[in-house]
Each structure stands twice: as structure tokens, then as C-alpha cells.
Amino acid sequence: MAQKVEISSKNNLQISDQIKEYINKKVSRLERVLPEIEETRVELASSRAIRNRKDRDVAQFTLQGKGFTLRSEERGGDLMTAIDKAADKMQRQIERFKGKRNRGRGDGTSAAGDTTFMEKIEEAAPSQIVRRKSFTLIPMDENEAIEQMTLLAHEDFFIFYNVNTSSINVLYKRRDGDYGLIEPKVG
């Protein structure tokens, strides 16, 4: 079992012991595939305001270990279905991650060493900034940033330290499916 499995819920959703046991069973299967997992967070939510019944229940898995963070989120008609879908998606992400980690980067270092992503959420004044995040930027090139954006399931943008330009860049996905790169300059 992971060092820590944290199960939380949103929208006053009550989590039964049966669901907790089911989640622990799914997490133990993921740990067999990737034993380096140090912490697992599972967030469950249910919203009756959503029209489509198949999208009302949400399960999000976040796995952290030394040098990596992987996330998956899926929706379903009930919590068990959402948990199954999210765990299956996480399994595919782990297999993809392990393949990329084993291939390496060509300079003798593992790609897994470049994926550290630590988040810290701080609350601020409600009329201004309502959420603040900080994370460690790991040096990588544009191709590695695209891989990380895919692994972390970031669909809009990804911030990284570009080793080629020695600056912070923002990678974003364009509507046509290609990627764009923002290279800020201090003026």
C-alpha cells in the first residue's frame, strides 16, 4: 500500500466504507504496476445539477512519487463507475509514463527525474485572488514539456523552465490541435 492514501469528497458527499475499500483495492492494483508511488489522493464529487446522469459523479486520482505526478479524472453515472474509469485511465497513464521513463532523454538522465510537480494552494482575499498555486519548475525542452502536459492531463497550458533558452515558457494547446509557445521577455 502507498505511504498515504487520502480520500476526500466535495459537495457534502458521504463516502461509505464500501467505497473506501473499493478505492484501496484499485490503488493497490496501481501500486503493483508502479511501486514508486508515495502518495495517492482520490477526490470524489457528485453534482445533481448536471443534466446528463452519466456525468454526475466524478472521481479524480492523483499519484505522487519521487520525480512524478500523474492525474486522471473521469465521470460516471455512479461513483463506482467513475472510480473504475479513473483507475483504468490512470493505469494507461502509468504504462505510458513507464515507457517514457525507460527510454530516457538521450543525455543519460531519466525523463522521470524531470517531472517533479509540487503544488501548494493558498487562500487569499475573496475579492481578488481566490486561489494561489506554487510549484517547482524542472528544466526541460519543448518536447518534454509536451509529454508532461499530456501526462498531467493539462488541456489548456503548461508552464516550464526551457533549458534551451534559459527562461520560463508557457506551452498551450491551440484549437487546431497543435501547440503554441509563449516566451515572455522583461521589457
Image: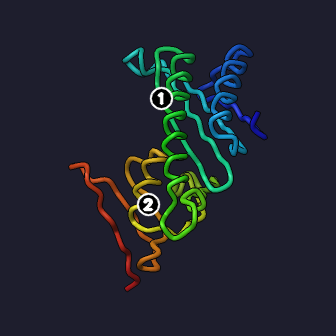
Residue receiving disc 1: 74
Q: Where residue 8 sits in the image (x, y, percent)?
A: 67, 31
Q: Amino acid at mark 2?
A: Ala
Q: Disc 1 versus disc 2: distance between alpha carbons?
A: 23 Å
Left/right of residue 183 with respect to residue 10 in the rendered view: left
Query: What crowding class fits label 1: few (fewer than 14 Cα within 10 Å), some (14-19), or many (20 or more)?
Result: many
With respect to residue 31, does 180 lie above or below?
below
Q: Residue at x 55, y 33 (%)?
A: 60
Residue receiving disc 2: 145
Q: Amino acid at mark 1?
A: Glu
Q: Residue at x 68, y 38 (%)?
A: 40
Q: Residue at x 46, y 15 (%)?
A: 77
Q: Are marks 1 and 2 in contact (CB under 8 Å)?
A: no
Left/right of residue 38 with respect to residue 60 in the rendered view: right
Q: Residue furthest bottom?
A: 187
Q: Where residue 11 sits in the image (x, y, percent)?
A: 59, 26
